[in-house]
Image (spheres, grey):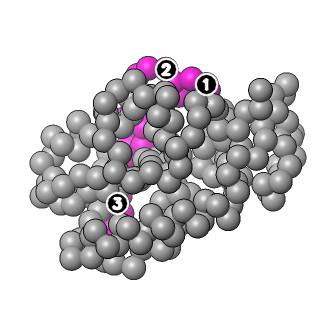
Amino acid sequence: MDELTQNGKDAIQIGSEKFVPFLTQDQIQKRIQELAKELCDEYRTKLPIFIGILNGSFMFLSDLMKEIDIHCEIDFFKLSSYGDEKISSGKVKLLKELNADISDRHIVIVEDIVDSGLSMKYIEELISSHNPASMKVVTLLLKPASLKYKVKIDYIGFEIPDKFVLGYGLDYAQKYRNLRSIYVLSE
């Protein structure tokens, strides 16, 4: 079993692939604080429901909620489009529905990463069918060069190149989500 690096300063070897530090825990936390301030300013007079997309967004949503100082609710969708692969299957499968009634609600979708936009397009269509009062999207990472679907992202943590990343909720075959920093596949 590979030993995990937790300090974000060392490369990680997974089989024959090497992952190098990309975004540190401090960089991530600083940007989350900025995003939380923007969200609080926008939703101060509303009662938003933050909808995390599992499994990847759990760390981002958790840290974001620690910085939110307004009344809000939280719920989750669970989707699958990757399985254990590094490349999307091209199909989205809904694994967990929402518990909350979201009609006439202010929705904030919280995603770990938007790359092709396939999952986000699916979520937007699904939520729109419930007639929310408003819908905004916040993602920690956006790969603009990978977008294949037209989706509106309202809050972006970091725009990143079209490279495979892991850590901080992002997985490789369901592992490495627990890393505090984000690593990128080295060339």
Cα gap from disc 1 to disc 3, whole angstroms: 28 Å
**Where is 26 relative to 134, above or below?**
below
Q: How crowded is mark 3: few (under 14 residues within 10 Å), some or many (20 or more)?
A: many
Q: Residue at x 24, y 52 (%)?
A: 135
172 up-or-down from 76: above or below: above
Look at label 2 and name its amino acid.
Answer: Ser
Residue 97 vertical position relative to residue 118 in the rendered view, above or below: below
Q: Which of marks 3 and 2 is nearer the N terminus?
A: 3
Residue 65 seen in the current view: no
Residue lying farthest to the top in this orientation: 90
Marks 3 and 2 sit apart, C-alpha to C-alpha, by 26 Å
The crowd level at tag 2 (other Cα within 10 Å; few <14, some 14-19, many 20+) is few
- Residue denoted by label 2: 89
Q: Position of residue 167 (x, y in %)?
A: 67, 47
Q: Give the range drawn in magenta.
A: 72-96
Residue 157: x, y in percent?
A: 50, 53
